[in-house]
Amino acid sequence: MAQTIWIHKLSDAKKREADGMDYICEHLFQAFTQTGKLSKTQGWNPLQNASAKDGTTYRALFCDLCGKNYNNGNVRMAKEPVLV
Ligand SMILES: [Zn+2]
């Protein structure tokens, strides 16, 4: 069974730093909250149509791990606050 990939919404300012992606994966989010900036050290895999189980698609930036684990429908939006 595919592993869920949690994504976090970016503010408009941060979207520009994320190549225009609207969301980032959990791992990039954790690194971001620690360093205060987006880093490519864990990989940099923009997906234009990362899809959730209900068919919703997101423009999301994944680390290499999530890029590998991604399957149609295993993306879920995390409920944490929006990054600023
Ligand atoms: Zn990840």
Image (cartoon, grey):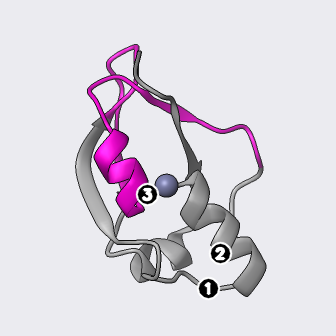
Give the secondary structure at mark 1.
Answer: loop
Q: Position of residue 69 (x, y in %)?
A: 35, 40
Q: Tag 3: residue type?
A: Asp
**Label 2 vs label 3: CA separation?**
15 Å
Location of mark 3 (residue): 22
Q: Within 10 angstroms of label 3, few (less than 14), some, or many (20 or more) residues?
A: many
Q: Position of residue 3 (x, y in %)?
A: 48, 28
Position of the N terminus, as image quadrant, is top left
Q: Quick one: 64 or 38, which is closer to the camera?
A: 64
Q: Position of residue 19 (x, y in %)?
A: 32, 75
Q: Tag 1: residue type?
A: Lys
Residue at position x 29%, y 63% from top?
A: 45
Residue at position x 34%, y 71% from top?
A: 44
Location of mark 1 (residue): 37
Q: Is residue 10 visible?
A: no
Find residue 3 and name its label. Answer: none
Q: Is residue 58 magenta?
A: yes
Q: Within 10 angstroms of label 1, few (less than 14), some, or many (20 or more) residues?
A: few
